[in-house]
Image (spheres, grey):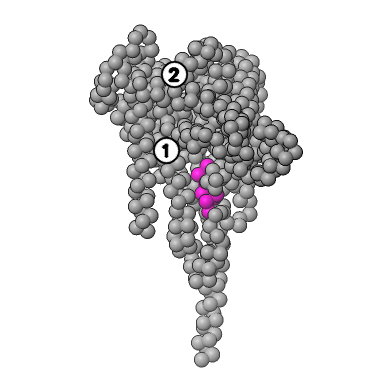
Amino acid sequence: MNGTKRQINAWTFVAPSLILTLIFGVYPVFWALKYMFYDYQGFGTPLFVGLDNFERLLRDKDFWKSVVNTFIYAGGKLVITIPLSFVLAVVLNRALKGRQLLRAIYFMPTVISASVMAIVFYVIFNSYNGMVNQLLMGAGIVSAPIDWLGAKHALVTAIIIAIWGAVGNYMLLFIAGLQNIPEDLYEAASLDGAGPLRKMWSITVPMLGPVLQMIIMLAITVSLKGYESIMVLTEGGPYGKTEVMYLYLYKLFFPVSSGGSSIQQFGYGSAVGFTTAVIVGLITLIYFYVSKKLNDIY
Amino acid sequence: MSTLHAETKIASAQTAGSIKTKALLSRILLWIFLLLVAALALFPLILAFFGSLKSNLELTTGTSLLPKEWKFSNYAQAWTSANFARFTWNSVFISTFTTIGTLLIGTMAAYAVARVDFYGKRLYVVIQSCTLFISIGAVVLRPQFDLMVALHLQKSLWGVIIILISAHATAFFMLIGFVRAISKELDEAAFIDGCNFYSVYFRVILPLLTPALGVTALWTFRGAWNEYILPLVFTMTQPALQTLTVGLAGLKYGVGDAAQPQLMLAGACVSMLPMIIVYIFANKTFMQMTAGSVKG
């Protein structure tokens, strides 16, 4: 059954997929790998400049500020999202009346486009006439409107929106992991007199180990890469307070109406793109290494 | 002796009572917590919905949740003068053809990979998984755009559709699991009955994949419908080609006059509604897709 004819048959079926992937997925990566050594603004002849772009990158304060913002953004999002979604998963994995409905409600935000939700939040978080402030003030919780999208709070607001969109997703991933833990382990522990917290630490967490590790890794990479909602919400402003690295990168290729430079910089942008990919890769590796070490100790 | 016995009895009755109250109390606290999270999850959507029915004045100054006067005309205005009819059509067009193309290309590749040990299979699978893990962000959009200029597709929705189809690695990996779940004996029986490689795909694999196709279609459609940056880059200067996500974000800058929040919310509801309706009916499928990625 694996003769030449079958080989050719198989290749005709893989070819469309492979060709599209090579042209639109692989080629752009090599394009970037080439132009990161060039001075290229989108017109004229690209000029080979060696490592100049990387030298400039090292001195580019705005870029490194965006890297720091990315860490704050991703860190803030994960510190709330992971524990909250884990607790929800544990609770909703038990026999509980209405758990299907609750799961469906918690998961609902994840089916909505990040950009659309950013617009909704933009309107309701609006400082002087947004509904959140109106309600907070109406209820007497705050006396003056909070400037949600101002320099002081914008990054926190962006984190709130990211958490809102992510909790349901990770809750579901945790539930899927929890369902792989055999029920009789808990029964045996109950017979031995273990309480709920004890069961959590001695059964749930260790048994969930590899899945937990995978989910957190996924969460880290996803939150480092996310910039859609920030782009719609604040475009990185005010004063670059919400500029994350992938948004900074985007602006080098597609300058936006406010903030940042207004010149396309493909060569420098490619260098920035390469560097951001390396940063994400490194963080993933470090996480992988540390969590493996922790596993060994455990 | 008997007093001691009685004392222990009373004590144990008291503990039983306090355990019961404790259990009840923790149940109440648990439900408060669960309902609070549910309220927070729904809160922005509810605000968006009621807000979309308020007048501009009430939206910016009022403090009540419900609109005093239900202005359904906001939707009419969004639909016609803010061009949401056009945006909706474009979103439907892009999402539909992206889904069809992804399913076709994805099932073909998944069938070949699952059933034949062809030369270069490992390399092909490695390339597909690399596209999932390596991300250089917006950089790829530039060469992709140049490629579409070369193909004269930069002024049509097909450029966006083709690029969205080209990112079919997730669908491919979902589908390959489903194809593997189909018994090979069925293929072999079909071969004995005179089928060839292609007719097995059409007559055995595709019909048996139907439920999986539904799941993958939903996943792909949602992705295309919610896509923002790719259609934005391709239609920045062509309002007639913009999708709901792009057109909606454009309202932030106001069309002609000052930005109108009630229109933004009406537009957001128009963009969200199809997904929410599908979700209400198929939430199990949506959740199954996400859960499957862990079990897989």
How far across and down, in percent of the image, does residue A196 sit? 49, 62
Tell me the residue at 54%/13% (across/down): B153
Quarter where residue A59 is shown? top left
A175 or A43: which is nearer to us?
Answer: A43
- Magenta region, main secondary structure: helix
Chain label for disc 2: B
Horizontal relation, residue A247 to residue B51: left or right: left
Q: Is B56 inside the magenta-drawn segment?
A: no
Residue type marked 2: Pro
Q: Which residue is mark 2?
A: B143
Q: Residue at x 65, y 44 (%)?
A: B184
Task: Report helix, strand or loop for mark 1.
Answer: helix
Residue placed most toward the observer, B51 or A74: A74
Identity of the residue drawn at 59% across and 46% down: A103
Q: Tell me if B67 is positioned left or right of A276 in this view.
A: right
Residue at the spot of label 1: A221
The x, y position of residue B242, in whole percent, is: 56, 17
The picture places residue A4, in percent across and down from the top left corner, at: 58, 32
